[in-house]
Image (cartoon, grey):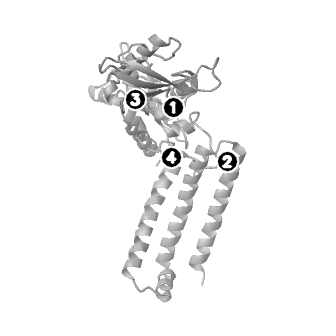
């Protein structure tokens, strides 16, 4: 019993009037391969199948997709972790426009990332060599800088589904806090001023879908709480 | 920064704080009312009316009504912005909600100080 039943979302806007689910039988020869390997096997049968992949080891963040209802990276997700009754259902990341098959348009996701100004801002004169940071201050960035922007978290968040143009989303907010927490960044005030409206941060309802799906084990909900604490300390 | 003009406090931070403080006030009020009913099994009109005749109870009740009004405004505003996308219908729904909250609040005050 090594044949896997795979149901995969297909949509080619040039030839299909609507998306549909296509069934595949994949022979994994009883091995517990990664979901990305299954996609490669399917692509041998049908090389029109489109999906993104690059490093195939959970570093580049290209192959985020929805596997049996849960977002994750196909390259580091073994079948044994997602299979339900020998069946695998693959869909594109929810909430973003589909370009083709499992390839989504990440434009809105990147727009929100751009909005939080994900770069160090410091208006003091640059020192001769480098801006030093104490080991304790450096420790504050752990659990924040590791994000690979795969979009698994933001596309599992209902608040992002309903308002992707206004709510920054868990990925963007994790990065926002990464710079708010950085001892070398001096733009804290203007960063916070950009976030105090009812959408950018406060559309987060704390349901923690982001934490449940993050392939890197990060905690955007905690970062959002810290941003809220900073806003509160600043405004009361 | 996303501009908003129909939410309660004009700021996400103030809405967030008001939502939490009002929730605590309503929780305390609910616990008090339930406990009062449990400790007064054979409650008659005179006792009930006497409770609400006292100034502290009127302040407590009005505080709970105002909390409920603010809480409903913040919460329902959020629901309308999540689910109602056409601007005209959304602004209409928000107006109906805010007017209804106002009517219920004035009505509540009238009941509290009436008879």
Q: How many marks?
A: 4
Residue A64 x/y as whole percent: 44, 24
Nearest to viewer (mark 3 / mark 4): 3
Please rate how many residues cluster around mark 2, counting C-alpha atoms within 10 Å: few if below 14, some from 14 to 19, many from 20: some
Q: Secondary structure at mark 2?
A: helix
Residue B67 x/y as whole percent: 52, 62
Nearest to viewer (mark 2 / mark 4): 2
The residue to which callout 4 is attached is: B13
Instruction: Name the residue located 50 percent from the left edge and 72 percent from the top edge.
Output: B61
Which disc number belongs to residue A87? 3
The image quarter in which residue B110 lies:
bottom right
Marked residue chain, label 2: B
In three-dimensional space, the C-alpha distance between marks 1 and 4, rounded to whole angstroms, equals 29 Å
Residue B64 x/y as whole percent: 50, 67
Which disc number belongs to residue B90? 2
Residue A127 x/y as whole percent: 39, 16
């Amino acid at each position: 019993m090594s044949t896997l039943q795979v149901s995969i979302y297909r949509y080619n806007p040039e030839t299909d009037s609507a998306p549909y689910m296509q069934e595949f039988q994949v022979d994994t020869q009883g091995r517990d391969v990664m979901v990305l390997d299954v996609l490669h096997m399917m692509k041998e049968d049908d090389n029109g199948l489109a999906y993104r992949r690059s490093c195939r080891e959970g570093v580049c963040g290209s192959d985020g997709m929805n596997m049996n209802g849960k977002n994750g990276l196909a390259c580091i997700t073994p079948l044994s972790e997602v299979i339900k009754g020998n069946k695998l259902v693959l869909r594109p990341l929810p909430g973003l426009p589909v370009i083709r098959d499992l390839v989504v348009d990440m434009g809105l996701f990147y727009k929100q990332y751009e909005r939080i100004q994900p770069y160090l801002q410091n208006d003091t004169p640059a020192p001769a060599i480098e801006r030093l940071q104490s080991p304790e201050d450096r420790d504050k960035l752990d659990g924040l800088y590791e994000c690979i922007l795969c979009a698994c978290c933001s596309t599992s968040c209902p608040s992002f589904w309903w308002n992707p143009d206004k709510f920054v989303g868990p990925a963007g907010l994790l990065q926002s806090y990464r710079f708010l927490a950085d001892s070398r960044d001096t733009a804290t005030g203007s960063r916070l001023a950009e976030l105090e409206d009812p959408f950018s941060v406060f559309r987060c309802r704390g349901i923690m879908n982001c934490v449940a799906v993050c392939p890197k084990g990060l905690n955007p909900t905690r970062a959002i709480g810290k941003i809220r604490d900073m806003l509160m300390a600043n405004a009361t | 920064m996303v501009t908003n003009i129909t939410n309660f406090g004009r700021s996400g931070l103030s809405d967030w704080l008001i939502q939490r403080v009002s929730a605590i006030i309503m929780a305390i009020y609910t616990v008090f009312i339930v406990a009062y009913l449990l400790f007064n099994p054979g409650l008659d009109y005179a006792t009930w009316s006497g409770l609400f005749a006292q100034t502290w109870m009127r302040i407590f009740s009005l505080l709970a009504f105002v909390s409920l009004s603010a809480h409903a405004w913040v919460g329902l505003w959020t629901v309308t912005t999540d689910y109602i996308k056409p601007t005209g219908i959304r602004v209409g729904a928000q107006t109906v909600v805010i007017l209804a909250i106002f009517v219920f609040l004035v009505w509540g005050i009238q009941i509290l100080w009436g008879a």
